[in-house]
Structure formats: C-alpha cells, structure tokens
Amino acid sequence: MLGRSVALPAPVREAAQRAARLTFVLALLLGGLGLPAASHAAEGDTQATDPSPVAQAADAGLATQPADATIVAQPADPRAFAQTGFRIDRDSFWDVFTHRGGAATFGYPVSRDFQFMGCTSQFFQRLVMQQCDGQGVGLMNLLDDGLLPYTHINGSTFPAPDPALKASTPKVTDPNYAKLILGFVGSHAPDTFDGQPVNFGKTFFSTIPAGVAGTDDLNVLGLLDLEIWGAPTSAPAYDPTNHNFIYQRFQRGIMHYDKGCGCTQGLLLADYLKALLTGDNLPPDLAAQAQAANSPLLRAAVGNSALAGTVFANAFTKGAGSASGAASSTQTLALQPVVAATPNAPPQLSSPDYGLSMFLWNEPTTTDRDLKIASGMSFHWQKTLFQWREIEGTAKGVYNWTEADRIVKASAQAGVKIIARLDFEPMWARKDQAHNGPPDNYQDYADFVTAFVSRYKPGSAIGSVDAIEVWNEVNLTREWGNQPIDQQQAADYVRLLGGAYKAAHAANPNVIVISAGLSPTGVHSTDAWDDAEYLQWLFDAGLRGGVNYDVLGAHGNTQAPDVDVALGSLANFPHPSFYFRRVEQLRDVQVKAGDGNRQIWLLEFGWTSDPIHPNYSWFAVSEDKKATNVVAAFQYAKQHWTPWIGVMTLWTLADPTWSSDSEEFWWAIDNPDGTPRAALTAVRAARQAGQL
C-alpha cells in the first residue's frame, strides 16, 4: 500500500541515476566504434500494443512448440513468460532484452514495469532495467550503496568491494576509456584462481554472443559485456564457510564458481532485491543486514511508507500491463491475464520405449550384471534413484560424486540411458529432518539440480543423464515431509518443479524433465489423494508442458489381474486406480489441460506375486500370470497409446539385498542373485522375436 513519501539517501538517488549516465557514455563509445548500443524504440514510449505473434522466442532461449495433430496451435506472445507470470510491455525494454541475449542474460521478468526511484523500471531475475526522463535504457548497479551492498545472502558469503580496486578503475571521462576498461577487466577477472578454473574472464567476455550483437569485433563485444556486468569491484574469494564456492563481485552482478559442477554463472541478484522490497522469500541474513543498515528498501512494497519516486501499485502482481500509470493514485491497476510464453518443444521419442528400474547404488558387484540384463532385452533406459542426501549430504555445495559417477559411467559403457530420480533431501536442507520431503528453501533443490545436470550433460567424460524425475509420488504425505496433501501442497510441488525445470534446462537445454510419478490411489485424505484429481490440481496450479515439465510422469503398479479390462468392470476392483488403464484417465486430464502434445512416461508399472503380506496378497498373481501381463501391457500400449506413451519403465529388477520378507521382492522380474523369473524370460523372448 502507498503512504507518505520518504526521502532517499544520496547514495540511493545516485544509484538510480548512474545506470542512465553509463548507458549514455557507452552509447557514445559504441557509436565511435560503428555499432549502436541498442536499436531503441522511439523516445518516451510506454506500452506495447497488440504485438504481432512470432513462431519462436529465440532470444529468450525458448523453442517453438510444434502443433499436435489434434490441437489447434494458438499464436504465442514472445513477450510473455509463463515461467514467472510477467510480460515485457515496454518497447524499449523489450528491444534491449532481445539485443542483449534475452533470458540467458537477464533471466525472466519478475515484475511489471513501474516507477522505481524516479525512473520507469522492470525487474528481471538477474538485472533491473531503468529508463529515466526519456533517456536510453540503463541497468542498475545493484551492488551499490543503498541497494544491495551486502556480503551475506541466503547462507553464502561474498567478497566485499575493494576500495583500492574501485579507485583504480578507469574513469569514463578518459579519452582512452574503452581500451583501458577492457584491459582492466582482463587483468582483474581471471580464469584461474588458486588453481581452480573459475573462468570469470571467459564468462564476462562471452556474455553477449557475436550472433546476438551482430558483430565479431572483440572490442565492441567487450563493451557490451561491460554494460551487463560493470567493472570488477573485488578480487575472487572463497566462501569462508564453503570452499567449493568462489565468488567475484562486479558493479552489477556476482559471479559464482561451483567446484562441484565445474560451472560458473551469475547470481539472481534482482530476485534478492525484489525479496528485500516485498518480504517474500526474503533470506533471514539479508533481512538482518538491511535492518541493521536501516535500509528504506526493507519490505517497502508492503509497508506504510513509499520510497520517493516509487509507486509499487501492482508491480509484483503477476500479469501483463504496466504499473507505471498509477503514479498519482493508490488504486490497484486492473490485472490483465498473462499470455503464456512459447514453451520448449516436446522431446521426440519412440512410442513406446522400454525401460527397467534397477538398484545400482552401492552395488558395484551387480551393476554390470543388471545393466547387461537391460541391454540383453533391448531395453534402452534404466531408472535409478540418486538420493540428493547421498550426494550433497554434508553441507550445501559440498558434493560427493563418487557413487553417482560410477553408475553414470557404467550405464554409458553399457549403452543404456538414465532416468535419474532426484529426491530425499539432505538433513541440513530441512529443519524437521523428515525422511523424505521438500527442502525449506526450494532454491537449494534447484541448485542441486543445476550441479547434477551440469555434471552429466552431453560431452561429459563420465557419461550423461538424459532425463530426471523431480521427486516421487507427491500425492502421498510420506513423500512430502508428512505434510497434508491438499491443493496448496500441489501448488507447492509445481513451484518446486518449476525451479528445478529452469535450473535443469539452463544447465542442459536437451535434458528431459519428468514430473513426479503419482501413486495410483482413490483415497481422499490428508495422507493421500486420488492421482487423477491431484493431477488436475497440478494443472490448476500452473503445470504446463515446456514451461515446467517436458513429459508427464505416471505410475502403473496394478491390482487388477488383467491388462485390457475396462475400468471398474471387475467386482473385486471397484475403483479405476486398481487398473492398468488408469493412465488413460490421467491422459484425459492432460489433454483437457491443453498438453496433448506431451508424452506420458510410466516410471513404474507391474504386478506382484506376493503370497505373504496381506496388504498385497489379496491382489497377487502367479509368476506366470505376471509374465503374461507384462508382455500384454507393452503390446496394449503400442496398439492403443501410441504416440502419447513414452518410456514404459518396468518395476523392477530385484535389489540384491532383498529377501522374500520384503514386499518389494515379489514385484521383481528376477531374483536377487540375477536369475530370471518368468516375466524376465517372457519379455526378453518377445523383444527378440519382434513381438514388442
């Protein structure tokens, strides 16, 4: 809400004006080199009006979604980003966004454009654009005094600005500024620090690709990169609490080298500035520093006072349209619906394809045996659980890749692709230390996904992971930290999935992100919820193909004793969740939501032969019937579910440690010693005979 105006300290006013001055200087420098700083729209523009739709938002790193034969493709609005729910309305901001690398440089928009510190501004995940009094578009120096001059954010410690280094920075008034500043960056942004390949210089000087800039002149490209990062203001430094992290501070960003994944990227600083203003997802250490500094920005968007020259109105309310027009009024602007961004294209895969669950973790003596079973059956995929806590269990950013590397390397050598299930949080990530539940800070999981996907992307000497499953059976409370299962919890999962999706595709654009397979159930309680109804909750909360998932995960562990029987047709199995064909109801929900061009992958399916455990023995089948059903399931899917069914992951090869006392033992298609049961023999024979 708006209240009385508070005068800003001089450093804050200067920070808001400095970006425009720097852009003006750079425009002169770049003009002297024969290239404009940007092809800006007419001075004083405000809103985009009904922009022409285009087939591809290439500068935003988004691929076109081809039309499905059964779906009428709708024109996409390249300025709208369903990933965050905001649109770039202002023509001059859109022009800079598209001519400076799009989402790869700025991240996605996280606000509308609005009046902030006297200038029309728009927040992106990494940077803030501003346009002041009809001048060109500039970028705020986010780390200046009065904005984010802090050294502790979200548990990480960054180097403080070095006064001596700042004093030695070339002055923009120097006639040789262009040459001097690029030399200064080259001297102070190293690619190697303390023997570590931090690649700070390479990251800086490769920010704006030649194809985007329209020139291969290294001087021009360097000045464009300077426009994004500003000059270095510190030397590289280790995070004192985590020596796997090395940071370097610049005027407008902080570079982060993660030894675990060997990757360097910029922090999402403008997201933290937004958190400071709104109080949403505000890290406690950032809040404490801002409070100690008596920062007028702390929760300014929700307080009783307004910053001078700032009108928040509905700036951080998702939707299209500018908030700038509310400068003289406290009335909330009408929220316009977001036109979804062009999503990533669906992966083109066989229908069906063949996968097999197996237990390779900490089982080096049986790994090759089990992978050879898969390859011997001409199965192309294996699914393995990579527990987050087993890899990053000691502390955030401290990784133990030994066992994961072994499994990925063995799979690569066997020619079997990997579906990596990623869940089971480390104890440091969740205060109540639940057996399996989402972290308290969803960004911790996204950071882990970044490290994991970066390490195992194509070209890795270890091997690659082609697909990841984001959590498991999230419609069960035991898989979600014992929290109640309801619509809010479903929305929370979509938020976790969305962060993981963005992280994964930033690390490897071709990785396949699979939503969690849901547990087939007809229960309605806080402990579990009907999987078809829960899937609808997910779509209601914003689940969308190409935006936060690539293929839809499902489970088909079946109670009904036959494959093709109609739902509810057997007296002993009244609910549709008991049937193999339950997945057809999930497909109906997916198609109704507009995602009919996305495949569904069965991440588990099978039948049990358990004669021991009462909870399972009532629907158990014989080993021979299990064999018949498994072959029939693949055949039914090929006949009735092509092209929308993808990988069908059979549950399962036996864990070498299982015995008949375990209920899981009876689902397996082999024995713990690797000898085949009837189902393995039947499937292998059907594949070899061309029947599957």
Image (tube, rainbow, N blue to C red):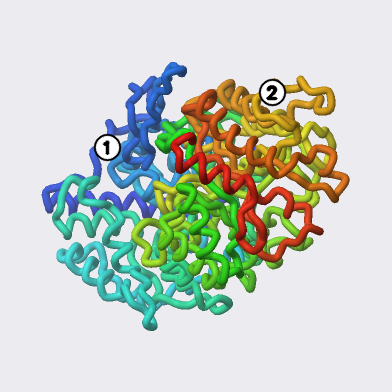
Amino acid, disc 1? His
Q: Is residue 411 left or right of residue 484?
A: left
Q: Position of residue 466 (x, y in %)?
A: 45, 51
Badge 1 crowding class, 10 Å Cα cut-off, few under 14, some 14 to 19, many 20 or more, is some
User: Image height check: is 98 above or below 405?
Assistant: above
Give the quarter of the figure containing the N terminus.
top right
Mark 1 = which residue? Answer: 40
Q: Residue at x 17, y 66 (%)?
A: 179
Q: Residue at x 78, y 61 (%)?
A: 432
Q: CA distance from mark 2 to mark 1?
A: 63 Å
Badge 2 crowding class, 10 Å Cα cut-off, few under 14, some 14 to 19, many 20 or more, is few
Q: Residue furthest right?
A: 614
* Front residue (pair 508, 245): 508
Q: Position of residue 426 (x, y in %)?
A: 67, 65
Viewer can see residue 247: yes
* Front residue (pair 507, 478): 478
Mark 2 = which residue? Answer: 565
* Front residue (pair 22, 259): 259
Amino acid, disc 2? Val
Mark before the other along the chain sequence, 2 or 1: 1
Q: Residue at x 75, y 45 (%)?
A: 609
| Residue depth check, mark 2 versus mark 1: number of the one nearer the observer | 2
Q: Residue at x 40, y 59 (%)?
A: 252
